[in-house]
Image (tube, rainbow, N blue to C red):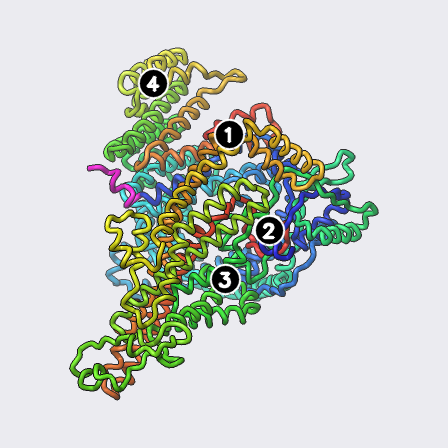
Amino acid sequence: MMPEISFNIDHGYLEGLLRGFKSGILKQADYLNLIQCETLDDLKLHLQSTDYGNFLANEPSPLTVSVIDDKLREKLVIEVEHMRNHALEPLSTFLDYVKYSYMIDNVILLITGTLHGRPIHELLPKCHPLGTFDQLAAINLANTSIMLYNAVLVDTPLAPYIKDCISAEDLDEMNVEIIRNTLYKSYLEDFYNFCKKQGGATADVMCEALAFDADRRAFIITINSFGTELSKDDRMKLYPRCGNLYPTGLKMLGECDDYEQVKAVADYYPQYKELFENSGSNPGEKTLEDKFFEHEVKLMKKAFMQQFQFGVFYAYIRLKEQENRNILWIGECVAQRHRAKIDSYIPIF
Amino acid sequence: MSMDALLRSEEMTLCQMFLQSEAAYACVSELGEIGLVQFRDLNPDVNAFQRKFVSEIRRCEEMERKLRFLEKEINKDGIPMLNTGDNPEAPAPREMIDLEATYEKLENEMKEVNSNSEALKRNFLELTELKHILRKTQTFFEETMQGYQDPSLSRSHYTEPTSKERNSTNLIVGFSLQTSQSDDQRSSTCISRFSDIVLFIRLKKNMNGDSVHKSVFIIFFQGEQLKSRIKKICEGYRATLYPCPETQAERREMAIGVMTRIEDLNTVLGQTQDHRHRVLVAAAKNIKVWSIKVRKIKAIYHTLNMFNLDVTQKCLIAECWCPVADLDRIQQALRSGTERSGSSVPSIINRMQTRMVPPTYNRCNKFTQGFQNIVDAYGVACYREVNPAPFTCITFPFLFAVMFGDMGHGAIMFLFALFLVLKEKQLQAKKIQNEIFSTFFGGRYIILLMGAFSIYTGLIYNDVFSKSLNLFGCQWVIPATDKAYDLAALEAADKIVVKPNGTFTGSSYPIGVDPIWSLASNKIAFTNSLKMKMSIILGIFQMFFGISLSYLNHRHFQKPLNIIFDFIPMVVFLFCMFGYLVILVFVKWLKYSSTSSQEPPSLLIVVVVVVVVVADYYYFCYCYYYCFLQQGFQSFLVVVAVLCVPWMMLGKPMYMRYMKRYGQVSVQNLLICLTHCFETKRCLWYSALLLNVLHEEFSEVLIHQVIHTIEFCLGCISHTASYLRLWALSLAHAQLSEVLWQMVLRIAFGFSRGWGAIALFIIFQVWAALTVMILVLMEGLSAFLHALRLHWVEFQSKFYDGSGHIFVPFSFNSIADASPDE
């Protein structure tokens, strides 16, 4: 009837906890301090005064960016796992859905890795811990997508997503890209439908967020496909059909041949028009990718405006990912003494 | 002066210190030991990592990390860490390098030992696995040889390979980590897609203290290209593969080799463990002292980071708050710090003039600390404001006891607190972390006094576990000659009314309530009347006292206006409304004796008549007045009380407005006074405050005063009513303990002789447990909270501002006590 009334019975604790986590997200003032750092140890010293606290205290100096990366990731994983362990239905399913995207990333990472002849035990630690599952290690068996399905994914939640692209062809780079995008497409659509089924504020917030994600994928697939042997029909099949672009926009995108045409499609959609207009690769301009990230941050911040819905969980994880990217960016700039671009992080609050 | 020291916070001064760069460290270390100065951060805008001594702090953090690592290793081995409780001085900066080297060496040694033993253990594990594999395969092959017809094996299509076949049949054996049966099956189905047979033998193994389920498996397959594939799968399922010789003789030989190697490894492992243990035991002796040292160094550098560098870069400039009375000790500390560092130039401390409000510092001992905490929990006193803590020391336990009046319960509480007080030193040394215990322990002196006062009020109420004591002899004597009380009359009557006229001896029970009341059916009515009046009296007195403390504040801060327009009307108002009531209570108590016990008028109605004009004037005149002219006097009081309201509300703003308009002279006087203050450099911050007053807007003052007046007038009534909680809680406590006696313990007295003893034994325990849990703990907590409220709201609101900030000196004591993760 009205899910808001009983929301707190099952999910109140976690929402409260999450909003607490959210207030620990670095503010603009913190970033201003961070970009003044001379060394990574300075970075550590400043992060100590924020919500991160002593998360680097047990690391011997000198620090490296990869150590910071691991620790940042570990912190997020601990938080998410804690919430997942305390979650009740349907929030637990929702959080599982969030994890599926990491699983897809891991599968693709390992396949590309093995294609390039890297040993599996070297690749496994690089996987995101939120997306690990038991069968992941057996992935180097997979020469074809059938094998991938049979040996690895059959028992995992990803199984239904891969059904669309099973073939006996040997895996090559092109195939992997197609598998990745098909998986993502099915995943996004599934997640979209799940959120829609939840109804209420969750549907409002999440459908908007996922629609944006779907549209972003469609744009990026189109732009990246220029100059490859991907046919327009195949490309069309990769577009997730749950965004604002569906159906007309996707049809138009499917016929694009160059960047200008993509831009022309975006012109029909005011929210995307703005992103395309202000982006560029010249110095001083932000790249399209950054523009998309900025828009995502804006959307995710908006998700916190509503209470009694699951969107905040998704939003928090996204924002935290963005924050980690920011810290790592600043960290890289500091470590490589390349300060010219240090302020092209994306502030959150 | 000494009176003032108790009443108000310490006089503070802002000082500037000039410390030679080389002496600064030693000086700050000395100051940390005495813990009397609070440093101001002179570079609040500078980032943590841009300060001067950031590299030293980083080194300290590195040392702390190493110490934490060592501590973790020591805990892992369960070696006790020696805590001698000694407090080493902060080491000199040059010693820091030695410390660093020591820790570095220890850490490296530890890491090396760890990695060695890790490798050895892994080796050991592999060999053990190999041993098991050999044993299992051995038994497997033997069984299949014998049990050729075994149905379970024939189903798996296994036939002992003939010598010809053997060449083409390969076999792989291995060990895989299994978390559950289903895992087993999943991997086996996966593998069996490619091979002929998979055989699992489940084993439970104990490794590194955790028990792990592992399985031995044997895979038979044909053809070389399958081999690589199976190997890949095994790798995917994190299984380890081992070589397995094909003939029995070879297997046996290998098994023997493995056994000897395992034994060798065992001795080596033992030696490494011994070495590790020795290193850790040596470290455990010093680790507490080391970590205190490092923490002190870190604190010193943190403090030094707050200082400014002088232009010549040769000395550091610090600003700090410190008590005026302790300037000598601080100077002494600076001198010894300078000497210790060997610097030739002395460190200088100067008093500074400032407009900043100094921090509030109340010197406390272990007795007053608890009461000061109660006051500070409400709000820290403004600088040099009257500190209610010394009065709270007595009024708090007393008001508590009024609500908790029972000699028995009071004694339990008193003895418990006495135990804590007597065992103080031992308990402190134990450093018990339990939150509930530390709350009780921190408030041990409060509890002690609360217990003692409860015994006293229990004596007044004549109440021990709801029973009365006849200590001094009851003063109600029933005369034997009186017909109304002879045996026949007593037997006939259900209830007997003891008339005070004939039975009361005339001299009262020496202290407290006469025990005869415990038998009376109108006991509650009697105690209610007593306790209600008493709580009103106590409340009014405490409020008067609070208001008179506000006089001390006004006088100290030199605010004559507040005395005329606040203090006096407050006193008058409170007296007219409730002071008169208190007088009536005493009159009633003194004027009527046992002989005139029917006559006294009801106080309630008198008070109603005071404020309400009643038509039937003569009737009330006749019945409810104590003396002639009372009616007129009462009307006078009401009029005065009503007049107090505009006096309080409008007096101050009107006066200030008038002075601003017409009283140029006096404003100038004020300014002269101010400049005088500046010149003589006395209480600068106070003159700043005066300046503020001068510039205050009329409307603001008026609004403030209106709010203040309404708050006070309504507060007078509601606070007086609020003091009735003294009676209510005391009644509740007495009733509850009586119920407990009647419903629980009395049952035991109803049994016949033999059973009675057993029943009493059991029931007494129930009663005692309930007494402690409900009456002492729960009721005690509730009375405590009510006493707290009476102090914070009813008492302190009359004079206490509580908007100061507390003095937080830089002290090693607080750093050493703090937990390491802070």
Q: Main secondary structure of the magenta part?
A: helix
Instruction: Name the amino acid type tagged 4.
Output: Ser
| Residue type marked 1 | Glu
Crowd tier of the residue under label 1, counting other residues whose Cα lies within 10 Å: few below 14, some 14–19, many 20 or above: few
Q: Which residues are magenta?
A: A1-11
Q: Residue furthest bottom?
A: B754
Quarter assignment of residue B233: top left
Q: Residues at badges 3 and 2 in contact (C-beta under 8 Å)?
A: no
The residue that mark 2 highlights is B9
Of circles 3 and 1, which is in front? 1
Instruction: Report the chain holding disc 2.
Output: B
Distance between the alpha carbons at the discs numbered 3 and 1: 42 Å
The disc label shown at residue A231, or none: 4
Mark in front: 4 vs 3: 3
Asked if residue B795 is among those painted magenta in the image, a careful observer would answer no
Q: Quadrant of residue A250?
A: top left
